[in-house]
Image (cartoon, rainbow, N blue to C red):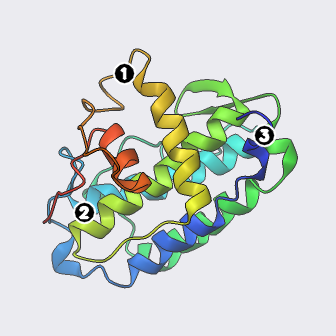
């Protein structure tokens, strides 16, 4: 993983999330999502924050506005009116920041957690892929993910499944059939049911 991590481009996953945004209607902002504690508006606000947080993590800098860039505090009540334009900009900035090889070196901090930068970059990718899947399922849109991103997230989640999983970050692993597609396996390892539908 160490040698391959810097070669993982967050751009395809970020672009896939951006493509979903146009398919989210205002009346879907209160719809439930596979992430049990979130409705769609909460999830979008969470993504607004995480995009900034992981961009700062790549740049190795403290957030200028901790409240604005706090991943894990999603609330539809705080979702900015211009989120449809702003979220794609933030996702682009996040992906661009992690294209710098220096982003993957040393350590990085996001949400009050410090990790080796090569792991933090993969956590950022995981957030894009899994929450992209959440958003697609919650709004009835198709979701696909490039093979490189899917495999990187699957490797990260496979490793974390063997360790003590923080309950605030992961649900219990959901078993999937043997031979299931890599994305379904990653979704199951993240604590979601790949068969979930709105």
How would you rate the neighbour count of disc 3 (Cα within 10 Å): few for under 14, some for 14-19, many for 20 or more? many
Q: Secondary structure at mark 1?
A: loop
Question: In terms of sequence position, does the residue under pointer 2 or pointer 3 come before the other?
Answer: 2
Report the residue at 59% width, 46% height from top.
152
Q: Position of residue 87 (x, y in %)?
A: 50, 69
Q: Are marks 2 and 3 in contact (CB under 8 Å)?
A: no
What whole-number distance in Å separates the C-alpha atoms at marks 2 and 1?
23 Å
The C terminus: image quadrant: bottom left
As displayed, is residue 140 above or below residue 145? below
Of badges 2 and 3, the one in the foreground is 3
Which numbered marker is on residue 40?
Answer: 2
Residue 65 shows in this picture: no
According to the picture, the residue beneath numbered tag 3 turns out to be 104
Q: Calculate the distance from the C-alpha at mark 3 to the C-alpha at mark 1.
A: 24 Å
- Cα–Cα gap, marks 2 and 3: 31 Å
Q: Give 59 or 99, whichever is nearer the viewer.
A: 99
Above or below 62: residue 90: below
Residues 40 and 197: in front is: 197
**Residue 11 in view here:** yes
Q: Of all residues shown, which one is farthest toward the top? A: 164
**Left or right, 186 with reference to 103:** left
Query: Which residue is label 1 attached to?
Result: 166
* Residue 6 picture location, percent across and down: 78, 46
Q: Nearer the viewer, residue 66 or 145?
A: 145
- Provide residue 109's location: percent of width, then percent of height: 64, 31
Which residue is found at the position 51% from the left and 27% from the top?
159
Packing grade of label 2 (10 A; few <14, some 14-19, many >=20) is many
């Amino acid at each position: 993983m160490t040698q391959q991590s810097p070669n993982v481009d967050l751009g395809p996953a970020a672009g896939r999330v951006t493509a979903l945004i146009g398919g989210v209607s205002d009346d879907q902002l209160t719809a439930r999502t596979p992430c049990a504690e979130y409705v769609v508006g909460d999830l979008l606000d969470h993504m607004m924050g995480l995009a900034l947080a992981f961009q700062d993590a790549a740049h190795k800098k403290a957030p200028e506005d901790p409240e604005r860039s706090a991943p894990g505090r999603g609330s539809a009540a705080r979702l900015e009116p211009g989120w449809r334009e702003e979220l794609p900009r933030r996702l682009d900035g996040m992906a661009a920041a992690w294209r710098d090889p220096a982003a993957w070196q040393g350590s990085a901090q996001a949400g009050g957690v410090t990790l080796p930068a090569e792991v933090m970059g993969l956590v950022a990718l995981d957030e894009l892929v899994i929450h992209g899947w959440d958003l697609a399922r919650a709004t009835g849109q198709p979701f696909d993910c490039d093979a490189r991103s899917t495999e990187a997230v699957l490797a990260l989640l496979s490793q974390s499944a063997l360790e003590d999983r923080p309950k605030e970050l992961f649900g219990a692993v959901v078993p999937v059939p043997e031979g299931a597609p890599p994305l379904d396996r990653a979704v199951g390892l993240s604590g979601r049911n790949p068969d979930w539908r709105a």
